[in-house]
Image (tube, rainbow, N blue to C red):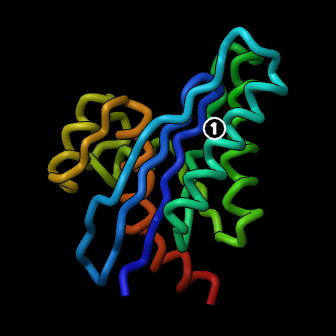
Amino acid sequence: MALRILGIDPGLRNMGWGLIAQEGSKLSFLACGTIKSDEKQALSVRLKQLHDGLREIVATYTPDEAAVEETFVNKDARATLKLGHARGVALLVPALAGISVAEYAPNLIKKTIVGAGHADKDQIHMMVKVLLPKSDAKTPDAADALAIALTHAQHRGLAQRLKA
């Protein structure tokens, strides 16, 4: 039976999500998209919009596992904090549904997908299309989320062996 993996690229404005299936070494594309929040609304309302959108994705597609990109700290502390709020939603929604959530550093995702830890977004999106030819990511956030799901598919066995 195929394992359904949900990758989540957290963002306050746009939260990307991508769902893949893994059966042994075979990976296949299932769905992807972007959850948007209204920039004109208060932070609390925007977080609720992300929560409700992601909760609907989890309820519709019933993933078995989830993976979220870790936050990188940038020079703008305020932006980093806002991203942290969105990441909290990305971690919370699957956890509330009883789904285990793994976290991956941006450089590990890039290295796993492209082979270099400092790959640019275009390289990542091109490799996602190579690895998942039927994928139809319409936004960079959705493509990033698929890359996160692919990274989890590659590394999940190692993480389970290390726990044991």
Packing grade of label 1 (10 A; few <14, some 14-19, many >=20) is: some
Q: Which residue is mark 1?
A: 71
**Is 57 situated above or below 48?**
below
**Is 115 situated above or below 64?**
above
The residue under the point 15% across, 52% down is: 133
- Tag 1 secondary structure: loop
Give how far across and how far down residue 17 sits, in percent: 48, 46
**Is 105 situated above or below 6?**
above
| Quarter of the figure that contains the N terminus | bottom left
Give how far across and how far down residue 67 sits, in percent: 55, 58
Q: Nearer the viewer, residue 104 or 11?
A: 11
Q: Seen from this angle, which residue lies furthest top?
A: 40
Q: Nearer the viewer, residue 150 or 113?
A: 150
Give how far across and how far down residue 123 sits, in percent: 23, 34
* Identity, as a three-letter code, of the amino acid under mark 1: Thr
The residue under the point 65% across, 70% down is: 100
